Image (cartoon, coloured by chain):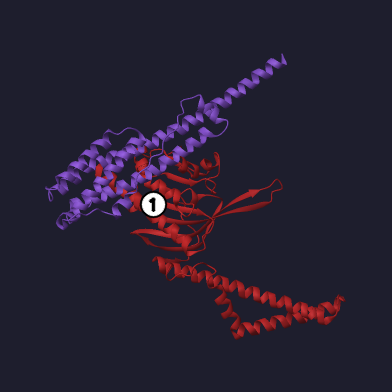
């Protein structure tokens, strides 16, 4: 009888511990997903801004068709990208193309003086800062989740549940991109 | 920072030297040493504790230490005043002699008695602002009826955002630093907030490791998340000072545990307040623009 009671108590304790760890992992995983949504929102805002920027620069440099086409294609790829790895590649490509558009704009002082263009530049810079901050928070959440998955005894629960590893989101630093515009004469 | 000594102790040595070089202090030192030496000799001889000469020198040494202690305390006070006057000049604020603050936020209403030790006043981006050392104290009574007090010193920066309207959707936001006096673990922190509040968790594990965010009923959750944008969360996480803040009925109070006694620390708190106040003002302006 005593043995049965001990076994039942042990099983109940193990069950409780399992549930506790499971819920903790679910919480950490949801937080990674939430942070990814945060990045997604900021990226979407940047995608929405790109056509306005292109239109503004096009008005002064219509002959730079190849540059505009490249940024439009990069935007389309970025919108279609799925998941952190694919998105990071597409967004890095879009960032590079945006640098090209900005470099084109550099050649037109009257364009740079317009209020519309300045506003777009400010919005884009703010968005890029928000994207970098979102990326930092997302990667922090991924590391937190991964640590939770890997430590014992969580690793036992994680191996038997829907807790796959989450990739980090790596973006090129827009400050570096901004600092070296590729101006071609 | 230009114009301000580095900290409250920076000019103490210079003041001590100046004080001890004045004739009146030298006379005071000599007089006190002689007087206490004489007292020592008389008392020592009368009680038979030892030779009168030894008692004389003992008394004189006590007198010397006493006067030097007084000189040190005076120099310390002057150095602190120098520091705060210099900081006021450097930050465009003025030294104030106020010794209390209105109970505008939970921290300013905390404890059983409160006081201000040092205070600077002025404007920050057009808003009335105050920066300084604030302490609240809690009274404890033991079973024998003895009373004791526990002090909770803070460095605070208070901004009146009232002119921006402080709409209800943003009034009642309390960001407590975990491990700080106000952000003690468990339900205690909630108990220290005198209004009905809910705890909110944001999208960052790193942020939630460091802070507890409470909001009052009526705060718009969407607007709250817009205020706590990713860049704001990162700024708060990375800030060199372990700051927290309270936003209540148009008053913004940024706070750090303990007194910051150096220009760098106090300027950090002031600049953090400026940055937070700007974000709140921007959010209010955006809200007004979108709601017509």
Q: Position of residue B148 (x, y in %)?
A: 65, 53
Give the vertical position of B137 relative to A171 (above or below).
below
Q: Residue at x 42, y 58 (%)?
A: B270
Q: In the figure, the purple chain has which letter?
A: A
* In this rendering, position of residue B73 left or right of residue A3: left
Q: Is residue B167 visible?
A: no
Give the residue drawn at x 35%, y 50%.
B279
Residue placed under numbered mark 1 in the picture: B276
Q: Write down the chain letter for disc 1.
A: B
Q: Which chain is red?
A: B
Asked if A7 appears above or below B188 in the picture, the reply is above
The quadrant of the image that shows the C terminus of chain B is top left
Determine the residue positioned at 34% across, 42% down.
Answer: B226
The N terminus of chain B lies in quadrant? bottom left
B247 with respect to A12 (left or right): left
Classed neighbour count for the residue bearing mark 1: other residues with Cα under 10 Å, few (<14), some (14–19), many (≥20):
many
């Amino acid at each position: 009888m005593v043995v049965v009671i001990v076994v039942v108590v042990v099983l109940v304790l193990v069950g409780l511990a399992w549930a506790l760890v499971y819920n903790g992992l679910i919480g950490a995983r949801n937080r990674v997903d939430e942070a990814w949504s945060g990045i997604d929102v900021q990226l979407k805002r940047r995608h929405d801004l790109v056509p306005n920027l292109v239109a503004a620069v096009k008005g002064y440099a219509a002959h730079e068709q190849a540059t505009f086409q490249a940024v439009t294609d990069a935007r389309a790829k970025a919108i279609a990208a799925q998941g952190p790895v694919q998105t990071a590649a597409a967004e890095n490509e879009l960032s590079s193309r945006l640098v090209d558009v900005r470099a084109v704009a550099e050649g037109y002082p009257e364009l740079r003086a317009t209020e519309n263009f300045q506003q777009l530049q400010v919005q884009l810079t703010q968005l890029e800062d928000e994207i970098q901050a979102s990326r930092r928070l997302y990667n922090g959440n991924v590391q937190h989740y991964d640590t939770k998955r890997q430590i014992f005894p969580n690793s036992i629960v994680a191996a038997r549940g829907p807790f796959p590893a989450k990739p980090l989101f790596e973006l090129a630093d827009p400050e570096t991109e901004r600092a070296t515009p590729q101006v071609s004469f | 920072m230009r114009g301000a000594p580095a900290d409250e102790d920076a000019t103490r040595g210079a003041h001590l030297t100046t004080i001890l070089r004045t004739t009146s202090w030298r006379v005071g030192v000599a007089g006190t040493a002689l007087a206490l030496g004489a007292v020592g000799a008389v008392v020592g001889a009368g009680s038979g504790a030892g030779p009168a000469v030894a008692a004389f020198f003992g008394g004189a040494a006590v007198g010397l230490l006493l006067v030097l202690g007084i000189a040190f305390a005076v120099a310390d006070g002057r150095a602190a005043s120098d520091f705060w006057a210099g900081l006021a000049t450097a930050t465009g604020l003025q030294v104030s002699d106020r010794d209390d603050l209105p109970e505008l936020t939970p921290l300013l209403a905390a404890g059983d008695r409160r006081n201000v030790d040092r205070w600077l006043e002025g404007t920050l981006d057009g808003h009335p602002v105050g920066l300084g050392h604030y302490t609240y104290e809690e009274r404890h009574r033991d079973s024998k009826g003895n009373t004791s007090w526990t002090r909770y010193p803070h460095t605070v920066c208070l901004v009146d955002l009232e002119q921006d309207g402080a709409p209800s959707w943003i009034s009642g936001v309390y960001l407590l630093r975990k491990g700080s006096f106000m952000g003690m673990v468990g339900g205690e922190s909630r108990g220290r907030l005198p209004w009905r509040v809910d705890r909110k968790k944001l999208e960052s594990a790193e942020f939630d490791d460091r802070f507890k965010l409470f909001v009052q009923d009526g705060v718009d959750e969407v607007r709250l998340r817009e205020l706590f944008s990713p860049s704001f969360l990162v700024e708060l996480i990375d800030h060199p000072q372990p700051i927290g803040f309270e936003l209540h009925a148009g008053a913004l109070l940024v706070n750090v545990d303990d007194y910051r006694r150096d220009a760098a620390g106090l300027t950090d708190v002031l600049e953090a307040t400026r940055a937070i106040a700007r974000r709140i003002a921007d959010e209010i302006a955006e809200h007004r623009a979108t709601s017509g």
